Amino acid sequence: MDEMEAMQIKEFTKDMDKNQKVAYYEQKSKNVGIATALSIIIAGVGQMYLGKVGKGILILLFCWLVIPWIYGIYDAYKGAKDYNARLYSLVFSEQEGTEIVE
């Protein structure tokens, strides 16, 4: 997620109530299992699912070396978790009494 998208999310969710924020988070978050499974099946597709198309293409081109493929699986898993943590902090940061869990 780039800074422009982060600013848009923060601006979009600032006037939402808690239920609307929860629904928005669930809709916008990425599924860690899907990202990982896609990278296992076809190297680099998990990164593409997360919006990192250039990185996904590089992993796909060099997956025959096996190490980029293994890295791609790990990166898709970690990338989805990081994306969801950042999204959570952006959506719920202004809400009082909510702790940010990473």
Image (tube, grey):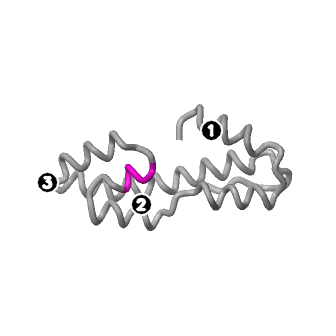
Of residues 60 and 86, the one nearer the viewer is: 60
What residue sits right under mark 3 in the picture? 64
- Who comes first in sequence, dot 2 or dot 1? 1
Q: Mark on residue 6?
A: 1
Q: Secondary structure at mark 2?
A: helix
Query: Which range of residues does the magenta coloring cover?
Result: 46-50
Please report contact status of discs 2 and 1: CB closer than 8 Å, yes or no.
no
- Who comes first in sequence, dot 3 or dot 1? 1
Q: Mark on residue 22?
A: none
Q: Residue at x 28, y 44 (%)?
A: 57
In this view, the residue farthest toward the top is 4
Crowd around label 1: few <14 · some 14–19 · many ≥20 (10 Å) = some
Crowd around label 3: few <14 · some 14–19 · many ≥20 (10 Å) = few
Q: Is residue 66 magenta?
A: no
Of residues 16 and 82, the one nearer the viewer is: 16
Q: Amino acid at mark 2?
A: Ala
Q: Residue at x 48, y 63 (%)?
A: 32
Which secondary structure dominates the residues rendered in magenta? helix
Question: If the image is split into quadrants, where does the C terminus sit?
Answer: bottom right
Real-space CA distance between mark 3 and mark 1, rounded to the nearest whole angstrom? 35 Å
Q: Amino acid at mark 3?
A: Trp
Q: Secondary structure at mark 1?
A: helix
Q: Residue at x 39, y 55 (%)?
A: 76
Residue 38: percent from left, percent from top = 35, 62
Q: Tell me the quarter of the picture where residue 42 sits.
A: bottom left
Of residues 3 and 23, the one nearer the viewer is: 23
Residue 95: percent from left, percent from top = 82, 50
What residue sits right under mark 2 in the picture? 35
Q: Is residue 2 left or right of residue 7?
A: left
Residue 96: percent from left, percent from top = 85, 51
- Who comes first in sequence, dot 3 or dot 2? 2
Real-space CA distance between mark 3 and mark 2, rounded to the nearest whole angstrom? 20 Å
